[in-house]
């Protein structure tokens, strides 16, 4: 049975692994970004447009389909593995042979054409890891997944740093991805202790086809939605502007991966087990929305408040123009913490076609927003994307209400208090940095800002969300005392 305490424990392990990867990746990115600059980073960002879209087909969608099924047979796993590998090899071949055409279409030039064939070599590795990852998620072995990701992240970062210091330039980023995916694939296979077999019936593949088709379409449209601004920025504003946007978005994306991806990995399978219990699904969605807002709001707004210190310190003065872009993107964090819970509910409750409908609406809104703002520059495009993300709250809030009975008003209320507290915290930190930033060494100023922000957030949370503040104080007290049983009881609502 899925309980809040067990869910929280799983999320904690997954988030801990993601946090470790975030720190290691940030250090590697700082070293590499200083060496290669915004233009080369923008070219590499374009490689994600085509490789990432193919990856949706070969790994993300099939993994989701296996996790969501209530009954899983060996034939399902074998059929998924074979299908994913065929798609991956075909995509790798097409990308390799069409690299020049793709680079010309995306505006990446000869540099993009050169890296695409090797960059796409990650696709078979991701396809191979699809079934082991899904099996570990179904078994709620998130500690194992976190360990594999942490080891792969460290080795990939070391490879990238060594390569860039040796003068590899943009190829150091390619090396990072190849090492990351290879190590991750090997470790996941060992941890899952699963081996592909030949036993599979036609019915095994057709059982998965309906959910797979909707998942491919939904995640595909979502991915295109995220990559369309990059293509338009590159073709209209240039690869240097794209590099600034891509780095700023990488900070936002890494923060999201640290918190939101673990929530999805745990909550979606949990919801799948609760499809027949609407009341339990409603309670779980409500508690997860509140917990996600309490944790994510101060992270995103805190990063926005210290971006002016953090970005030049980590990446150098060449990246100063990325500061306001990153600050705007962090506003997406409020929506991201709700969005990932809403999508988990929709998909876990067996409605991938609803997710597909939402993705289609989102893509239309993104195209309209970017086209309207592109002539006014990078900041205008970023602001338009933030506005578009909040508009998408409406259909997804309705989806969750239909599936669980959790009203749109309660969904909004779950994030309101923590968001207001985080806004107050960010304003105070910005004022502190503006007042004392130039008089204090930058590392000391960052440390002071973090401690000051935490104190202000807890105080503001007591005003705007008293119940959440009491929960945080109790959880922190249990952690300080080392009271594991008390913490588990608190997380389970006892």
Image (tube, helix red, strand yellow):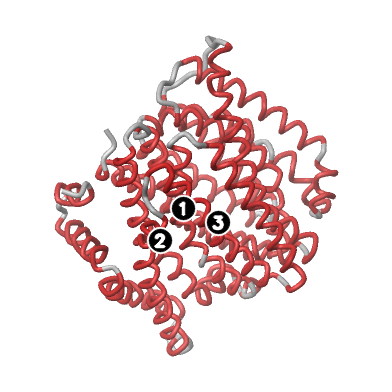
Give me the residue at 53% from left, 16% from top.
204
Tag 3: Cα neighbours inside 10 Å, few (<14), some, or many (≥20)?
some
Q: Which residue is label 3 attached to?
A: 392
As displayed, is residue 64 above or below residue 302?
above
Across and down, in percent, residue 286 comes to 33, 51
Q: Element type at marker 3?
A: loop
Q: Using the image as rendered, state which of residue 179 and residue 21 is in the foreground.
A: 21
Quarter placement of the N terminus: top left
How many neighbours does mark 1 have within 10 angstroms: few (below 14), some (14-19), or many (20 or more)? many
Rounded to the nearest whole Å, what is the CA distance between mark 1 and mark 2?
A: 9 Å
**Residue 88 in the figure: left or right of residue 99:** left
- From where the camera sits, is residue 116 visible? yes
State the SS at label 1: helix
> x, y percentage for residue 230?
70, 57
Write down the residue under mark 1.
397
Q: Is residue 74 left or right of residue 106?
A: left
Q: Residues within 10 Å of mark 2 (few under 14, many from 20)?
A: some
Between the residue at mark 2 and the residue at mark 3, the CA separation in whole angstroms equals 13 Å
Give residue 56's position: percent from left, percent from top: 61, 38
Q: Viewed as shown, does residue 425 lie left or right of 324? A: left
Q: Is residue 370 above or below residue 316?
A: above
Residue at which label 2 appears: 412
* Side of 415 relative to 476 (left or right): right
Q: Earlier in the sequence, mark 2 or mark 3?
A: 3
Instruction: Name the residue at 61% across, 26% down.
Output: 84
Q: Quadrant of residue 265?
A: top left
């Amino acid at each position: 049975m899925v309980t809040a305490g067990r869910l929280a424990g799983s999320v904690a392990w997954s988030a801990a692994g993601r946090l470790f990867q975030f720190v290691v990746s940030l250090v590697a990115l700082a070293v590499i970004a200083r060496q290669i600059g915004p233009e080369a980073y923008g070219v590499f960002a374009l490689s994600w447009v085509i490789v990432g879209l193919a990856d949706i087909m070969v790994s993300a969608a099939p993994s989701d389909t296996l996790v969501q099924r209530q009954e899983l047979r060996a034939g399902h796993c074998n059929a998924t593995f074979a299908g994913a590998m065929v798609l991956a090899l075909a995509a790798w071949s097409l990308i390799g042979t069409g690299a020049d055409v793709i680079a010309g279409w995306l505006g990446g030039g000869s540099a993009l054409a050169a890296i695409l064939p090797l960059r796409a070599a990650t696709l078979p590795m991701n396809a191979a890891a699809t079934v082991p990852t899904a099996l570990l998620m179904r078994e709620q072995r998130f500690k194992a997944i976190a360990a594999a990701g942490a080891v792969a992240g460290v080795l990939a970062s070391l490879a990238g740093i060594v390569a860039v210091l040796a003068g590899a330039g943009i190829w150091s980023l390619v090396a990072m991805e190849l090492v990351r995916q290879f190590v991750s694939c090997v470790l996941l296979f060992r941890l899952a202790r699963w081996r592909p077999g030949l036993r599979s019936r036609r019915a095994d593949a057709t059982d998965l086809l309906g959910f797979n088709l909707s998942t491919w379409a939904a995640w595909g449209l979502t991915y295109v939605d995220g990559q369309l601004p990059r293509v338009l920025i590159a073709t209209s504003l240039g690869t240097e502007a794209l590099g600034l946007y891509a780095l700023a978005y990488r900070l936002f994306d890494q923060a999201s991966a640290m918190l939101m991806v673990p929530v999805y990995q745990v909550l979606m399978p949990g919801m799948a087990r609760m499809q027949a219990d609407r009341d339990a699904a409603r309670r779980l969605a409500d508690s997860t929305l509140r917990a996600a807002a309490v944790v994510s709001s101060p992270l995103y707004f805190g990063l926005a408040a210290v971006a002016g210190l953090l970005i030049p310190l980590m990446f150098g003065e060449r990246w100063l123009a990325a500061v306001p872009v990153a600050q705007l993107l962090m506003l997406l964090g409020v929506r991201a913490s709700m969005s990932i819970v809403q999508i988990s509910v929709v998909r876990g409750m067996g409605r991938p076609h609803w997710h597909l409908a939402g993705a289609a609406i989102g893509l239309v809104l993104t195209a309209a927003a970017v086209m309207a703002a592109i002539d006014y520059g990078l900041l205008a495009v970023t602001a338009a994307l933030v506005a578009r993300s909040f508009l998408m709250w409406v259909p997804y809030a309705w989806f969750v209400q239909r599936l669980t009975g959790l009203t749109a008003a309660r969904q909004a209320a779950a994030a309101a208090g923590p968001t207001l507290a985080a806004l107050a915290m960010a304003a105070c930190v910005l004022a502190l940095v503006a007042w004392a930033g130039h008089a204090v060494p930058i590392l000391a100023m960052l440390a002071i800002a973090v401690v000051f922000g935490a104190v202000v957030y807890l105080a503001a949370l007591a005003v705007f969300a008293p119940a959440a503040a009491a929960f945080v104080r109790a959880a922190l007290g249990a952690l300080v005392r080392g009271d594991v049983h008390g913490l588990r009881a608190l997380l389970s609502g006892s």
